[in-house]
Amino acid sequence: MIFFFFFFQFPACACCTTGVPVRLFFSENLQGANFTLTKNLETGSILVYRCPEGYYPYPERTRFCQRNGSWRPRPKKFPPQKCKLVECPDPNVLENGNVSPPQEKYFVDNETTYECYSGYKMRGSARRVCLKNGKWSGSTPICSRDCKPGQESSEKYSKYNVTSKETNTTDIRYTSEHKCKLYTITDYYKNKYTFDTPMEISKAFGSSIKETLTTLESTDDIQGERRIRISKNGTLNIYIGVDISESINEDYVNKSRDIVTKLITKISSFSVTPNYEIIFFSSELYEIVNIIDFLDGNAKLQDVKSKLEEFVVDRNTGTNLNIVFKKFLEKMSFIKEQTGEEGFKEHRHAIIVFTDGAYNMGGSPAPTVAQIKNMVYMNEAKAREDYLDIYIFAVGDEIFDEDLMPLTAGTGEHHYFRVKELEKLEETFDEMIDEDEVKGLCGLYKEYKEPRKEQKRKMFPWMAFVYTQGVGDPKKCMGSLVTPEFVLTAAHCVHGYLPENVIVEIDDERGKFKKAKTLIFHSNYSVTAKKHKGINEFYDYDVALIQLDEYVQISSDVRPICIPCTLETSAALHLVDETCESQEKLLLKNHLERLSFLTRTKNVVDIKDVHAKLGDNRYECIRQAVGVEGITQETLTEAVTDNFICTGGREPFRDHIACTGDSGGAVFKNFEYRTVQVALVSWGSINVCKDGGVRESTKTSRDFHINLFRVVPFLKNVLGKKDQDYEPLVFLEN
């Protein structure tokens, strides 16, 4: 089905006068077809046609208002402007096999199946679907005898490129003397409406750049995946350029800025702290962050984010893409001069540019890119290819692929991306940590604006549910994974039970439920310790560790939370002063410190936000415990010791309150995409809710949480103990 845009006759100076020069009529079945104008019909305005997902504007995507008052290209009565259904490339490229059904053209939702001739084996997807972005689902099918896609055998294979100027298609093919096609990578943008999905960008860009962000080495070299190894003394320099010229919609510019902020925040999750050069550009440069300041130790991540937020976009008509690469080359030259040639060899460089490629001054950046390559490669291109990556994110309504694609660099197969929806690109950076090489880092998590049930585990990969059975009424509590073998919870949740009566739900690749091997309690925990003083229940040192009978399989869905006073937590917080005190001052620095914990809901879990009342605010909070379990004004500080953090109430903020079943759960703080547990839920003054859920505190209800900074010796004695069958955590000495 085809839907039309209808044009009225254009006056001689239509694009320079008031009134829209186009009147559009749409079928009721085609919601979302419209157009936008960048400058309200003034000279230089761009008319952009927009179609619903799965359709594209034809014959033009944009029209430009010229100085003479006419549009370029000039609208014609025939062919009329319309929305056409997206078409996928011809799938009939399978050698030694058949494609069905045979069609002249293939459109969105059309399916194809592939079958190999006798004697040949199918590699790739046997069934594919034409997607709304103009690409086929799955992987390119190959019919071969002894060949495996992406792998070489003992035979000698040659690699050659086949480039079609007509379709702008490049096939990288491996062949043998027996003409056995091994692997085909199609990196094409045949149609102007074709774009990369967030999932594709995540897989390619995420797997590419994440290797530059860890000091962990991989021994698994897989064809088609990036494997960059940084030495412990290596340095990573990231150069970012954002096009803010008028050829790019202002909405794209603002979203690009948000994406850069998201990117550098996400990168801060990893163990390597890069140096940044960030530039906005049009005909001129606007340097947001100078990489030299990072090298001199005069720049901080928070300062970078503040400068990005404060920058006021000043757009002008020209675009000089070359000047951006020249600036990057200038900074590299300075670094090389400062470090010397041998020192420069330890520097890796990643260049990331957001642009449409519509430069009209400064000439082609290709010669400058060649100079950058020569500087980094040092006449050893093959040996030093992985020391330079240049990524191009093509954004905008009219993209110049032919000028941009040759600017990319790197040993990975995909460094060029066509981006349609920038806001979805933000989500792809969460996928960057979804890799084996960084899965052991504590506290890594993903963030979703409107998470689905299946995404909750990725948001809180350390969460555990603790169940007891066999003695009295069964209990349900929360817990947190702190190492692959240990779950931290409240002592009262499991005290009095044998290990065989305790089950932990933490769904990894091996299964959903784990048995307890050993229960370890703080030696000072005793509910009846203060009964002689009238305190019926005493919950000081209410902390326990459950040793599981088998290790949890660590992945992006299941990984430990960071806990206080460990070396890894200092790395997560980017602390130079590696002391327990510095961690506590950073995480609990305010007298009203915002913290969070989880509660069970129909949506698996939901988050509760509270404020720890510290310092001068603490006494007003804890005094609400008077009257609970025999606590009096005189025995208040004995019952609520300094080991407890107090939350709840309505002033100055209305906190959430813990419900039955929340006990033992992590009270945590998110810090630059790393989660650190500072306490665990212990007990409350009033039972406001019995079945979990997000509930607000009453005026007098309070919750009391065990401050983990106060029980570090217990944690260290178990989790840091050497000569055990588990890998110990490294705790700080002070």
Image: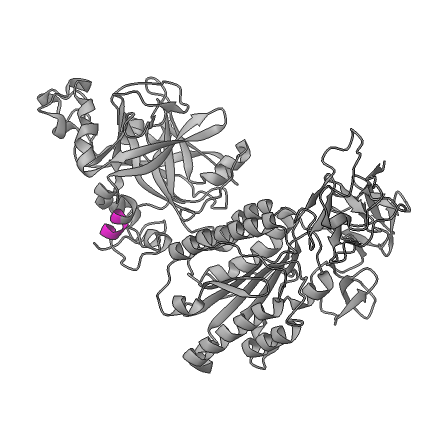
Q: Quadrant of residue 315?
A: bottom right
Up-down relation of residue 509 to residue 368 (above or below): above
Q: Quadrant of residue 205?
A: bottom right
Name the quadrant of the N terminus.
top right
Q: Is residue 602 left or right of residue 69?
A: left
Where is residue 628? Give x, y as percent: 19, 19
Q: Please state which of residues 673 and 284 is positioned toward the viewer in this rendering.
A: 284
Viewer can see residue 404: yes
- Residue at left 36%, top 23%? 696
Up-down relation of residue 550 to residue 69 (above or below): above
Up-down relation of residue 336 to residue 662 (above or below): below
Q: Is residue 643 left or right of residue 498?
A: left
Where is residue 591? Give x, y as percent: 24, 39
Q: Please state which of residues 112 and 109 is positioned toward the viewer in this rendering.
A: 109
Magenta segment, prevailing SS (helix, strand or loop): helix
Q: Is residue 580 left or right of residue 465?
A: left
Report the number of numbered marks. Answer: 0
The magenta-colored residue range is 580-585
Name the quadrant of the C terminus.
bottom left
Where is residue 414? Give x, y as percent: 65, 60
**Image coloring type:** one colour
Q: Is residue 587 left or right of residue 317?
A: left
Viewer can see residue 546: no
Magenta stretch encompasses residue 161: no
Where is residue 45? Give x, y as percent: 69, 52
Magenta stretch encompasses residue 583: yes
Q: Please state which of residues 570 and 127 is positioned toward the viewer in this rendering.
A: 570
Q: Quadrant of residue 318?
A: bottom right
